[in-house]
Image (cartoon, grey):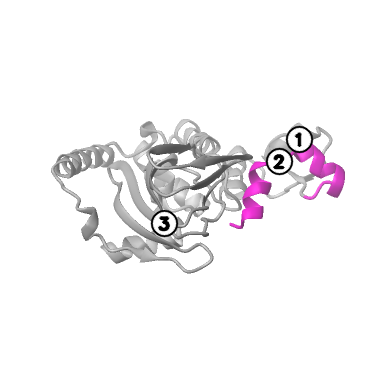
Amino acid sequence: MTNQGILMKTGYELRKSREFIGELYPVLLDASGKFVIDGVHRLKANPNWRAERLENIKDQKQVLVARIIANLCRREVPILERCMMFENLAWYLKEVEKLDSSNIAKEISRLTGVAYRTVCRYLPEKYKDKDKVQLRRLRDSKRINSASKRLIYIDSIPSYETPQPNKQEIKVIFSSNSPKLATIIETALYPKNSTTLHLHYDSNEFAYIQEGNGKCVIKDDVISIRPKTIVLCPMETPHQYINTGHTALKITYIYTPPLNLKSNVDFYKAYEKCK
């Protein structure tokens, strides 16, 4: 996503944009016109926002499936909204269609086209296969015990160097999604370089400044950073690091919950290099 896209996603007012460009997208309703599939925020901005009925969406199950497809598969939405959409559909399948909990995640994956593991990520435990949940907990507890005995020698980890204009060296020190522990990454940002303006949808970022001086942009604030300081960037907060000094700006990042490394090309290349 471009910097402009991030800013538009996180920092614009729907009412003001409507005054300038009009109603760009309609509110999507089911065939009866009673249930909103997509456009809740548009209706909050203007209750009379133009709407379009989808004649093929006729029952509650189709509405719940369509909401997931219209929102999650088309754009990024806050994690709580994602969880709510999946939970509503899971409730319907269990309470109305009397589907067994062990089959709910598979059925949602079949109906929406969303990967099974992704569905499981957002569903409450009560809508998951209990045997699989118990096996995963046992496996995770063993991994935690083994991880607690593991030593990581940072100097032995190979680094990946990114190209200009955001030149930096990246080391993925540790990343564990099963169990969900954390991701630890060390970077050395070259002088007069900067990271892109970006955000992390599902992870909080703690940045420990080891060496160098620079600036950190967090939303609309610009703060000076120096050694032995920590910057906290909550999830879904746009931020950027800028090296204003003459030496490398060395930063150690800790992400909780762990990052999806495949969502960041440079981080994933660094991860592949150290495997």
Above or below, comparing residue 161 to residue 51 in the picture = below
Residue at horizontal 75%, vertical 32%? 44
Residue 123 on image: x %, y %: 42, 38
The Cα atoms of the two marked residues, 3 and 1, are separated by 49 Å
Above or below, comparing residue 214 to residue 36 in the picture = below
Residue at horizontal 42%, vertical 48%? 118
Residue type at the position of mark 1: Leu
Which numbered circle lies on residue 173?
A: none
| Numbered disc 1: secondary structure | helix
Mark earlier in primary sequence (2, 3): 2
Q: Nearer the viewer, residue 100 or 218?
A: 218
Disc 3: CA contacts within 10 A as few (<14), some (14-19) or many (>=20): many
Task: Give the extent of the magenta segment.
Answer: 1-24
Residue at horizontal 81%, vertical 34%? 46
Which numbered circle lies on residue 43?
A: 1
Residue type at the position of mark 2: Gly
Horizontal placement of 246 versus 19: left or right? Answer: left
The Cα atoms of the two marked residues, 1 and 2, are separated by 6 Å
Residue bearing mark 3: 248
